Image (spheres, rainbow, N blue to C red):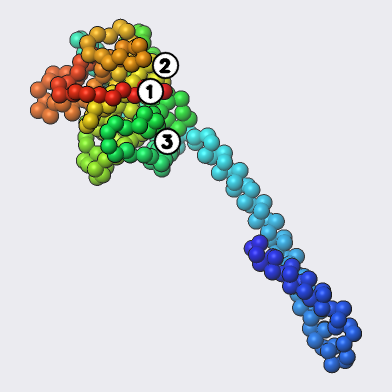
Amino acid sequence: MNRYLSFIVVAVLFIVMLLPGCISQDEGSAVECEQLEDDYEELQDDYEELSESYEALQSDYQDLYDRCSTSTSTPPPASPAWEDHVTYYRVTFGDEYEDYYFWQYSSYSYLGYWKDKERTIPRGYPVDSGVLNDYVVYDHQWTLIDSISEEIEKLSQDRTHYAKLALAFVHNAIYYMTDEESTGVGEYWKYPDETLFDKVGDCEDTTFLYASLLRARGIPAIIIEYEDHLAVGVGLPTFSGTYYEYDGTKYYFAETTSNMFDEDRERDRDFRIGECPEGLDEAYLHEVQ
């Protein structure tokens, strides 16, 4: 529309320049001058009409822009249909297998945000620490991590208990499944909210989820990277067992997958913090921000 308006303005100016010359022409040119005057008046009417349309469109555009800016900066509330969609997880913990129940809302608005978000799926080993940290999500307006971590904290006696319960939550809530099985893609890294929604994932998906739950409550964590596996290190001194030392702090190994190392279901429980599966050798350590 801007180009069309510019064309009309130029045409009007051109006609205005011709009019004085027309006045001095003989009677044979009078008809042509009258035609030019008629064309000028018609173009002037078109210009005024287009100007009004342009101003109206500008106003509509600004209204739409303001609404879009508001909708993308603040997550919309869950729709009534989703307010009734509550997922219950049964979390077993400890030698006595105490049972805990808590809920979370599933929301398409949150899921869509992460599905559409650009992601880097690295190739090779080791992976850049910045790329790994991109998948650790907490203190973010578009995530359920913070509300879930609050629910776990309410059930916890202290930070050590929280770390155990959070790991039990990941083990119980997320079933191990390869990327090929769950997404049809050979390698696909999920953000924590995608994993929560799908309820399946492989080692990097559960690693990012557990690391996010730890950092949401301020617990130090590292990502432990092996050539074909990821795990988490918990930076609390109250644990024992296998640990890695990073920057003067002991981080105790936490296996986040529930059945990756137990395809035959020979174990009667999941790995606890400080227990490490066999066959994991050289590791790179990545601090979680």
Q: Residue at x 33, y 35 (%)?
A: 190
Disc 1 secondary structure class = loop
Circles 2, 1 touching at the beta carbon (< 8 Å):
no
Choose top left, top right, bottom left or bottom right for residue 254: top left
Tag 3 or tag 1, which sits nearer the N-term?
Answer: 3
Q: Residue at x 14, y 21 (%)?
A: 278
What residue did someone put label 1 on? Answer: 288
Packing grade of label 1 (10 A; few <14, some 14-19, many >=20) is many
Dot label at residue 218: 2
Tag 1 or tag 2, which sits nearer the N-term?
Answer: 2
Q: Amino acid at mark 1?
A: Val
Disc 2 secondary structure class = loop
Residue 272 vertical position relative to residue 2 in the rendered view, above or below: above
Disc 3 secondary structure class = helix
Tag 2 or tag 3, which sits nearer the N-term?
Answer: 3
What residue did someone put label 3 on? Answer: 110
Q: Amino acid at mark 3?
A: Tyr
Q: Nearer the viewer, residue 267 or 125?
A: 125
Q: Nearer the viewer, residue 230 or 108?
A: 230
How far apart, in angstroms, are the residues tagged by discs 1 and 3?
23 Å
Q: Position of residue 167 (x, y in %)?
A: 28, 19
Q: Nearer the viewer, residue 275 or 216?
A: 275
Q: Is residue 95 visible?
A: yes
Packing grade of label 2 (10 A; few <14, some 14-19, many >=20) is few
* Quadrant of the drawing holding the N terminus: bottom right
Q: Nearer the viewer, mark 2 or mark 1?
A: 1
Q: Amino acid at mark 2?
A: Gly
How far apart, in angstroms, are the residues tagged by discs 3 and 2?
23 Å
Q: Is residue 287 left or right of residue 37?
A: left
Q: Residue at x 20, y 9 (%)?
A: 96
Residue 115 vertical position relative to residue 8 in the rendered view, above or below: above
